[in-house]
Image: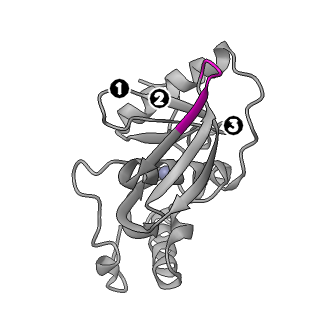
Amino acid sequence: MSQYSIRLYGDPVLRLRAPEVDTIDGRLKQLADDMVQTMYEAPGVGLAAPQVGVQKRMFVYDAGDGLGPRTVVNPVLSEVRGEWTYEEGCLSVPGLSWPIVRPKEVHLTGVDLEGNVVSIEADEFVARVFQHEVDHLDGVLLVERLDEDQRKEAKRILRARALGLPDADPDGLRTLTAGEQPAGHPGL
Ligand code: ZN
């Protein structure tokens, strides 16, 4: 079992902008290892440090390309292009997902755990993972990426959950969350 648990919607740490990492050392590598373990246990394919309560600009991900888990420190997105709709979920907002429109392609730069420059052109799913994780580092949850009506309804569901009410559907909102994550839907 990982020593970390994933922070959930409502935890204030998820709303803060995480500061840049200034030293890559053994402790940071240990944190990355622990985050990878937490991500796989979830299970998920991406996890940002604030999701385990750590205020550092770094995230881990597994692109499912057989290369295993990777860590990006101080990531920056640039050259965003296009538009792509994807049914997006979040490990910090479990069990819910929404079709969210975001840029289709991004260029991600940062450094890895050896201090080497990382520069990746990504599109579709991997580009989505990068955008989602960088949002976490900026204190932004996917709920903020919904349109106004979706967001209101989402907040109503999440408030009911916070109050311990059954995941009721008082206003017939199932259509909004029609995307309730199917089995195997990757968490971010
Ligand atoms: Zn997330």
Q: Is label 3 in a helix, a strand or a loop?
A: loop
Sequence-first tag of 3 and 2: 3
Q: Is label 1 in a helix, a strand or a loop?
A: loop
Magenta range is 113-119
User: Label for residue 56?
Assistant: 3
Given contact means CB atoms under 8 Å apart, are the residues at marks 3 and 2 in contact?
no
Mark 2, residues whose alpha carbon is within 10 Å: few (<14), some, or many (≥20)?
some
Q: What type is the residue that disc 2 sits on?
A: Arg
Rendered position, 132 above or below 142: above
| Relative side of 101 to 30, left or right | left
| Relative side of 15 to 129, left or right | right
Q: Which residue is mark 2?
A: 70
Q: Residue at x 31, y 85 (%)?
A: 172
Q: Nearer the viewer, mark 3 or mark 1?
A: 1
Mark 3–mark 1 Cα distance, whole angstroms, equals: 24 Å
| Relative side of 11 to 101, left or right | right
Q: Which residue is mark 1?
A: 67
Sequence-first tag of 3 and 1: 3
